[in-house]
Amino acid sequence: MTSLMEKEALQSPLIIEEQLQTNKKLLLQIAKSLQKKEIDFVQTIARGSSNNAAHFAKYLFENNLNIITCPAELCMRTVYKAKLNLKNSLVLAISQSGESPDLIEYLSYAKERSATTIAIVNSPNSPLAKIAEIVIPIHAGKEKAVAATKSFLATLSALIQLIGHIKNDKQLLALINKLPERLYECLDPLSEPFIKTFAKTKNLFVIARGYLLPIAKEIALKFKETCAIHAEAYSSAEILHGPMAMVDENFHGLFLFQKDESRKFTLDVFQKFAKLKARTFSFLPADLLMQTNTDKFFITPRSLHPVCDPLIQIQTFYPLCAKLSLIKNKNPDKPQNISKVTKTT
């Protein structure tokens, strides 16, 4: 049996390939418009997997545009009715459905307060999109499985393209056009080592740093959502401040490595896990394999660019996770207690 989750995840390379062509003119126009605006800071609003995408946006905006970017606490408006000063801000809403009342309320307030408002959505006719000054459709198509996959990848791709155009980064824009080719290489992962490692796991940490930390959060969410495995994502710096006390020979750690400055910090923590004889598994780009000493690993396609490589790792993970869910007698398409559209207030 192949789950809807796996089928939809496997659609991502084609979706992004088409998105690159469909959104090119739109994103160039949006970038030119944003370049003319005085934006001092960015706020992101999102929930679930979209919130992990928003965390990725933080790294993109801060590291490429030097603009402070932080997640908004939605309850400041929906519960406490705080009168926030959003002058010279950009409020970036990310949502697959565009129907969450709290996102709609916050974005509406931001627009009233003269913030520049952007909605990155899979449903361009949704209530959230209708409020936003700028709408970026991700063109992921209808996503039937409760667990988001292709919409998450398409959102990250749209964010990278937006940043590339704002920054006028010709190298990045050229390389992201090669991303679908790399993603196609991820479509038939050998699942046995992964499933054997995590089939009986009940608790684990997912550890990464930099651009891969939002991916670690997405992986942890999917472990919980589809496999009923308690997983928590940590920065390879933050984990040393308390959580390491839980690590022993029975504890699992999933490590994400990429070919940039973050590798050293994650490798240091990996080696601490090894000294404690903890059970480890790593995702490694093919061109980083000989530089990292780990006996249980999954080789992902070679590095393309530090901001593109996280998409390669999550593309590899999604089908593995869907298969693991079925092995554990779970339904990745309809996890218990969860609906596709969650309307929080």
Image: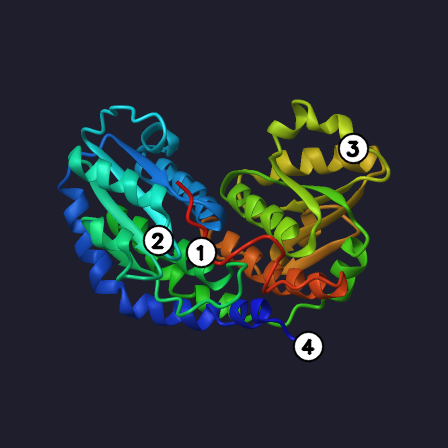
Question: In terms of depth relative to the viewer, which is nearer, 211 or 294?
Answer: 211
Neighbours of disc 1 within 10 Å: few (<14), some (14-19), many (20+)? few
The residue at which mark 1 appears reads as: 341
Which color scheme is applied?
rainbow
Sequence-wise, which precedes: disc 2 or disc 1? Answer: 2
In the rendered image, the quadrant that contains the N terminus is: bottom right
Which mark's residue is nearer the viewer, 1 or 4? 1
Residue at which label 3 appears: 247
Marks 2 & 1, CB-CB < 8 Å contact: yes
Is residue 92 rendered to the left or right of residue 50?
A: left
Circle on res. 1: 4
Q: Residues within 10 Å of mark 4 (few under 14, many from 20)?
A: few
Q: Is residue 24 above or below residue 251?
A: below
Q: Give the amino acid at mark 2.
A: Glu
Give the image location of residue 281, x and y in percent. Answer: 74, 49
Q: Earlier in the sequence, mark 3 or mark 4?
A: 4
Say if mark 1 contacts mark 4, CB within 8 Å: no
Q: Give the label on residue 222, or none.
A: none
First reached walking from the N terminus: tag 2 or tag 4: 4
The amino acid beneath tag 1 is Val
